[in-house]
């Protein structure tokens, strides 16, 4: 096991305490903008580019996962200046690994190009 050391001889195990790194339970992504056509924009659907995802087949793992847009505010609510807008990855968009996501409230346009977190839950495995 990690951080475990076995000494030779009588078969004693001495457990060595190691410093554990925090585990990140999300993938990073970038908000590209709203789904749109030539003239219309559909603000209810947001396009997200996930890091490390390059093909349409790779996006199938992320369909159904929760996504969070975390932002900082001026006024403190419940001892925190951070707030979250939650959404869900709905389906792929195109062939280059972009996904469509729907948020409970539409993301504001000022967040385009900003970071979004794609959580590793709910799991389909």
Image (cartoon, grey):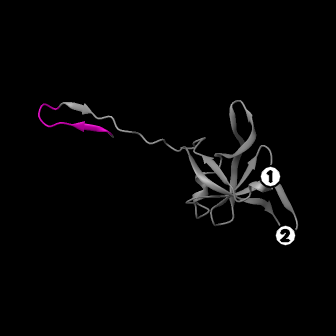
In this image, 52 relative to 98: left or right? left
Can you identify the residue that label 1 sits on? Answer: 108
Residue 42: tell me if it is visible.
Answer: yes
Instruction: Point out the residue furthest to the bottom here.
Output: 38
Image height of 110 relative to 79, above or below: below
| Secondary structure of the residue carrying numbered label 1 | loop
- Corner quadrant of residue 2: top left
Labels 2, 1: front one? 1
Task: Answer with mark 2 or mark 1, whichever residue precedes in sequence.
Answer: 2
Instruction: Point out the residue furthest to the front here.
Output: 74
Type of secondary structure dominating the magenta stretch: loop
Residue 86: tell me if it is visible.
Answer: no
Instruction: Point out the residue furthest to the left here.
Output: 9
- Residue shown at 59% from the left, 42% from the top: 121
Q: Could you classify mark 2 by the number of other residues whose Cα lies within 10 Å: few (under 14), some (14-19), or many (20 or more)?
A: few
| Secondary structure of the residue carrying numbered label 2 | loop
- Give x and y (percent) for residue 41: 84, 61
**Residue 5 forms part of the magenta stretch:** yes
Image height of 50 relative to 102, above or below: below
In this image, 32 relative to 1: left or right? right
Q: Nearer the viewer, residue 115 or 50?
A: 115
Q: Nearer the viewer, residue 26 or 77?
A: 77
**Residue 114 forms part of the magenta stretch:** no
Can you identify the residue that label 2 sits on? Answer: 38
Q: Quadrant of the N terminus?
A: top left
Q: Which residues are magenta?
A: 3-11
- Corner quadrant of residue 42: bottom right
Disc 2 to disc 1, C-alpha distance: 20 Å
Q: Nearer the viewer, residue 45 or 109?
A: 109
Q: Tag on residue 4? A: none
In this image, 32 relative to 26: left or right? right
């Amino acid at each position: 096991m990690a951080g475990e050391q076995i000494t030779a001889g009588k078969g004693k195990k001495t457990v060595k305490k190691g410093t554990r790194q925090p585990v990140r339970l999300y993938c990073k992504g970038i908000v590209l903008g709203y789904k749109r056509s030539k003239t219309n924009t559909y603000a209810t659907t947001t396009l997200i580019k996930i890091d490390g995802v390059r093909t349409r087949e790779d996006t199938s793992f992320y369909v159904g996962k929760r996504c969070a847009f975390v932002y900082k505010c001026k006024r403190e609510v419940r001892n925190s200046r951070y707030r979250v807008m939650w959404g869900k990855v709905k389906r792929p968009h195109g062939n280059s690994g972009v996904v469509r996501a729907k948020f409970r409230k539409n993301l504001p346009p000022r967040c385009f190009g900003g970071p979004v977190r794609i959580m590793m839950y709910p799991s389909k495995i």
